[in-house]
Amino acid sequence: MSAPASVRGGAPENPVRGTPGAVEGAVVGGVVGAVVGAVVEPSASEVAGAAAGERAGLWRRALAEFVGTGLLVAVVVGSGIAAANLSPDDVGLQLLENSLATTLGLAVLIAVLGPVSGAHLNPVVTLVDLLLGRQDPAGPRLADVTAYLAAQVTGGIGGAVLANAMFGEPTALATTDRASGATFLAEVVATAGLVLVIFGLLRAGRETMIAPAVGAYIGAAYWFTSSTSFANPAVTVGRVLSDSFAGIAPGSVLPFVLAQLVGGAVGIGLVAVLYPVRAAPVRR
């Protein structure tokens, strides 16, 4: 093994006797390192809290929800644009490509961000978590919910703009009208099933299965629902800003969001009946 450079050349030079640039560089480097360390590295209390299983700070969790929801919408919209470009004459193939990307992307995002924020990425999931956790002292607080909802909606909007930019598409209001009695029912079913999958697994003590299970469920719901399973108000709002295969006209947003909220309520009822007692403490 070769020796360090300072040893190979003899006794190490005193840094103070070096060139003036070396002195200033060392000082500047130390200051920058301290600033970056303060921003990036967690504090001792945060490290201790993480070791004890405590939640990350609210700003970190909100940032995770913003990034996660943004990336989810970018996956949905971006893959929709790509599918339309690659298979312009085959809508079924477009849906297959779009659903496959969403299935995989959603599962990965939940696995990566779950340890930080719980990876709700969905206002319905956040609201259901609040309602089901009211009796839990460690459950979500109203301030948490407010921060999560704001992060999810703004993240969804940002994700659509990002997807458009990556494909050189203009950010414009979508013109695809999706509202109908059938799609309203489809969104109720899709959202109720999503809530059941997430909170059923949590109450069964099988939270490690949530990421793949949610990805698989949403991928399947693309095909067994007439709405292609939006099941997420933040994603619905974000997709308004992409006039593409994945877009939804502004006039269809309110019926979809209302259906999703109804589905969330139905999901709560199913969870309460099927899983009245938690098998293990919920890890948030």
Image (cartoon, grey):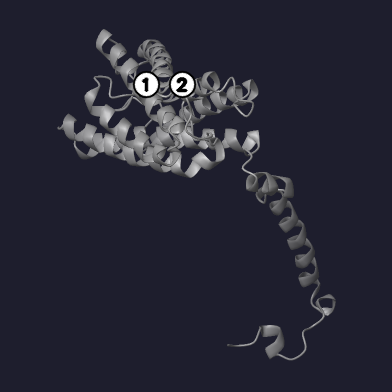
Which element carries disc 1, helix, strand or loop?
helix
Q: In this view, does 79 lie to the left or right of 132?
A: left
Percent across and percent down for residue 10 are 74, 91
Is residue 172 at least partly visible in the picture? no
- At numbered mark 2, what does the secondary structure look like: helix, strand or loop? helix
The one nearer the camera, 191 or 36, is 191
User: Is disc 2 surrounded by few (<14), some (14 to 19) or many (20+) residues within 10 Å?
Assistant: many
Q: In this view, does 146 lie to the left or right of 215?
A: right
Q: Nearer the viewer, residue 77 or 204?
A: 204
Residue 124 has which mark?
A: 2
Picture coordinates of residue 182, whole percent (x, y): 25, 11
In the rendered structure, are the residues bearing label 2 and label 1 in contact, judged by CB atoms less than 8 Å apart?
yes
Kind of residue at disc 1:
Thr
Q: Can residue 46 be seen in this view?
A: yes
Return the x and y of residue 11 as percentages of the image width and height. 77, 89
Q: Which of 33 and 281 is in front in this view?
A: 281
Residue located at (67% from left, 51% from top) = 41
Res. 191 mark: 1
